[in-house]
Image (cartoon, grey):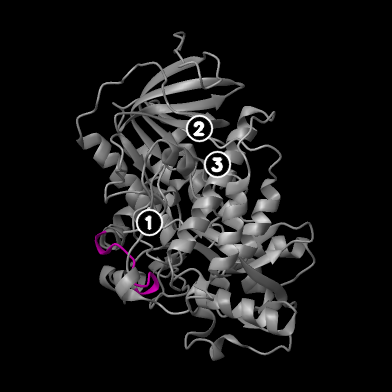
Amino acid sequence: MDMKYILSGDNGFDDGEQTVYDVVVVGAGVAGMTVALELNERFRVALLSKTGINEASTYKAQGGMAVAVGTDDSAERHIVDTLKVGQGLCCQEAVTCLAEEGLDALEFLLRQGVEFNRRNEGFDLTREAGHSRYRVAHYYDYTGRHIAERLEEKVAARKNVQWIKNCFVLEVLTNDERCYGCLAFYSGRLVVFWAKALVIASGGYAGIFADSTNSIAASGDGIAAAYRAGAVLADMEFVQFHPTSFLTPGGGVFLLTEALRGEGAVLRNAAGDRFMTSYHADGELAPRDEVSRAITKETKLSDAPVFLDARHLGKDYLAKRFRQVYTSLAGYGYFLEKDLVPVRPAAHYSIGGIKTDLWGRSSLDALYACGEASATGVHGANRLASNSLLEAVVFGRRVALAIASQPMHEVVFQSLKFLDRRALRRGLDIQNLGVSLNQAAGVIRNGAAMNKLLSSLRQIPNTECEADLLKQYSTANTFQLAELILAAGIARKESRGTHFRSDYPEKDDNCFRRHTIARWGKEVSME
Ligand code: SIN
C-alpha cells in the first residue's frame, strides 16, 4: 500500500496508491458476493462496490428466483421456456447450465442462510410470464433484498475478503490482451488494485433510462470500463422493459412485481376493460415485451394510463404476500384491495454486456464477468422472468470455479499505460439523455429516431470539463453506453424480443439470427 505507482504522464492523474489482491471482484449484488463466497480462503479477495447493497439491482428484485424445483417441473421444461422467451437468440449451452445447475444454486443460497417461503413440504412457488410451471421461489415480495442481506453477512465473516465500499472503478487495466487489475477512486484518491484476476459483476445499464425500475447506480460503469479496455460486448440493444411500474408523485419509478399478475392481478384500460386477452392468448402472463407493447398501445389509444387491478385478491392476502409493494403503495395513497393502480413500462434489465463464455471468461485474459454485467447468452433477445438472480448465482459460482481451477498469473506491476478513452464532454445533462433514451430507444423504436439521437451525441465535441473526476467518468460512461444501445439498436434491423422496431416489424431469421458485437474503435456489427 505504501508503494507509489507510476503513471504514464498524459492521463492527467497524480501518482497514487497501489494494493495487491489475488482476485478483485467489482459489484455489490448477488453475482459479486457469490464469487467472493465461492473462492476459498487461499485467495485474497477485494470486493469493490460503488454503493452499499441497497443500491444494487439484486436488492430491488421483488419476484424471486426461477428454479425447476416443483414436483411437476424439470430442468428440461425450464430450458424450453427460457429458449422460447429468448426468441431464437439464446446460447443453448448457457441455458442448459442455468437450468441444470438451478438446484445447486438454490442449495448454495440455503447454505448461506437464505430462506424462501414454504408451502406444505416444499417451496411456495409462484408463476410469472413465460413460465409453463409454478417455478419462482421467493421470500414474500423482497426476495432480492433478503438474499443480499444474508450474503452480505456471510461475506463480512470471511477473513480473506475485504469489502471496500464507495469505491468507483474507473478503468480496467490491460496489457497485451491481458487484464492486470483496475484503477479506482476511493476515499478521495486514486488507487490501483493489481490482481491476478478481475471480475466485473457490477450490474447493468438500465438505470441510464429516465424511466427505470433500477437505481441510478445501475449505470453500467463496469461494462463501459471493460469496453474501453478492449473487452468485446454483445447485444447492447436489448433492454428489457418491465410492463408494470408505478410512477411516484415525486417522479420516481417503483416496480410492481409480475408476481402480482402471477397470482391473479389483471390489467384494465381507461374504460375499465381487461385488454391483454385480445393481444395474447396468455393474457396478463404473456411475455414482458408483449405486455409492455400492449400497455403502450392502450395508453396511446385512450391518452390515459392503464391500471393494475388486484382488488379481488383481498387485503389480508395482499398485505402479507406483497408486503413491500403494499406498504409502499399505501404510502402514496393507493390501497391494492380497493384502488386501481396506474402502471406503465420502464427500463428494467439490460441483456447486453461483456460477452463471456460458459465460465464467465471475457475476450481479455484474466478478465471475467457475471450477472447483469455479462452477456452469457442465457437471455437471448428477451429474459424469462426471475432468471436473473439464478443466472447471477449459477455463473458467479462458475466464475469462482474457473478462477480456482486455472494456474494464476503472477501479478504484473508496471507503469500505467492505459489509454484514457473517456469522452469528456462539457455541459452534458445525464437526466436529459435518459429522457431522450426513453423516447428513441424505448419499447417501440425506429431507425430514424435512433439515428437522430446517435448522431447528435456523436456531434458533441470532446472538451476538457471542469467537473470532478467521478462526474467526468460517470457522464462519459453514460454517454458511451447510450451510444452503444443506439448503435446496436440500429444495426439489428428486425423486431425481436425486448423491443419492437416500427420500421422493421418482422423477425428476420435468415439474416439476423445473430448477435450485435461491439469492439472498441469499430462500428457495432452483426455476427
Ligand atoms: C418482478 O418481480 O416482476 C421482476 C422479476 C424479474 O425481473 O425477473
The spot of residue 60 in percent (x, y) is 57, 54
Q: Which mark is residue 407?
A: none
Give the residue number, with chain letter if any, for mark 3: 477
Viewer-proximal residue among 510 and 192: 510
Among the two numbered marks 1 and 3 on one chain, the one whose residue lies closer to the N terminus = 3
Give the Cα separation between the discs numbered 2 and 3: 11 Å
Residue 136 lies, with reference to residue 519, above or below; the image says below
Residue at position x 57%, y 67% from top? Answer: 448
Residue at position x 56%, y 62% from top? Answer: 450
Label 2 close to label 3 by CB (< 8 Å): no
Residue 487 lies, with reference to residue 198, above or below; the image says below
Foreground tag (1 vs 3): 1
The spot of residue 273 in percent (x, y) is 67, 90
Badge 2 marks a residue whose secondary structure is: strand
Residue 305 vs residue 386: left or right? right
Give the residue number, with chain letter if any, for mark 2: 169
Tag 3: residue type? Asn
Give the Cα separation between the discs numbered 1 and 3: 21 Å
Residue bounds of the magenta highlight: 84-93
Residue 305 lies, with reference to residue 324, above or below; the image says below
Tag 2: residue type? Val
Q: Residue 525 carries which label?
A: 1
Badge 1 marks a residue whose secondary structure is: strand
Give the Cα separation between the discs numbered 2 and 1: 28 Å
